Amino acid sequence: MTPFISIQSVTKIFQKGQSLIKPLEDLSLDVPQGEFLSLMGPSGSGKTTLLNLIAGIDRPNSGKIIIDKREVSGLSRAELTRWRARHVGYIFQLYHLVPILSAYENVELPLLLGKLGKAERQERILAALDLVGLADRADHRPAELSGGQEQRVAIARAIVHDPGLLVADEPTGDLDRESADGILKLLGSLADDHGKTIVMVTHDPRAAAAAHRSLHLEKGRFVESPTGHSVSASPSR
């Protein structure tokens, strides 16, 4: 079966002053559709760089990134922007909600860039809020919500345009354990029940354990995890 995400011999290089930094070197990875994958590793290991490449925020210096049978690594900046708007949902540690807007209005923001009519926007927004368990909080502003509820609104905003790919950067890093567990359960449901492919960066071993598969990065390469468990860039599901 063709993987949903195929990363083929990718290298990424940044220039810092007179030095060249290579956060990723000849990295390959396959991710099937509907997998919930976690990426772990110390600061500077390349995991956030990899997440940004998968999300189309940046492009590799060499190698290919193919997502849902499309080579996104070859797209222009303008093409990448259009592709991201349609195919990628973003979930961050800090929720980036607009304080003066209600949950409904925050979820609506990505749809305002498109051509949907008001009735169809409303249908999608209410469906997304219902999916994250916040249909009864649609008119609440962020200050009236708990941290876990704010993250659920952010997830609803990420999925309201029905992307196939969700990228999550420390999505539970600012939450207490109970709220974090609820968010991880929700992400698992989005993969298992709705076919979303999710790539999550985390420092939390408990969060990583909630994913279908966890990979550990060190200096731009996949390595054995510190716990001694082997890791593989090939899916086992």
Image: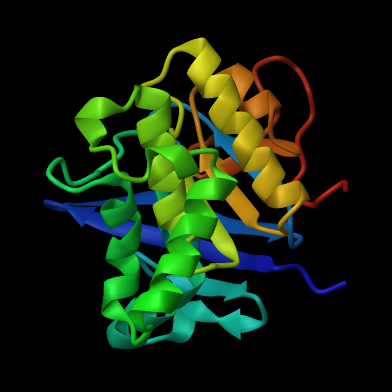
Q: Nearer the viewer, residue 136 or 217?
A: 136
Task: Report x, y in % for residue 90.
Answer: 41, 54
Q: Nearer the viewer, residue 12 or 200?
A: 200
How many labels sit on residues? Answer: 0
Task: Report x, y in % for residue 155.
Answer: 46, 46
Q: Is residue 39 visible?
A: yes
Splitting the image into 4 quarters, where does residue 3 fall?
Answer: bottom right
Splitting the image into 4 quarters, where does residue 55 fall?
Answer: bottom left
Q: Is residue 44 visible?
A: no
Task: Report x, y in % for residue 176.
Answer: 44, 13
Instruction: Give the residue drawn at x 70%, y 14%.
Output: 227
Q: Quadrant of the N terminus?
A: bottom right
* Left/right of residue 5 with respect to residue 204 in the rendered view: right
Instruction: Give the residue drawn at x 44%, y 34%.
Output: 171
* Left/right of residue 38 with respect to residue 99 in the rendered view: right
* Left/right of residue 230 with respect to residue 130 in the rendered view: right
Instruction: Give the residue drawn at x 62%, y 65%.
Output: 7
Image height check: is 18 above or below 59? Answer: above
Task: Report x, y in % for residue 43.
Answer: 38, 29
Q: What colour-coding does the image apply? A: rainbow
Splitting the image into 4 quarters, where does residue 119 fall?
Answer: bottom left
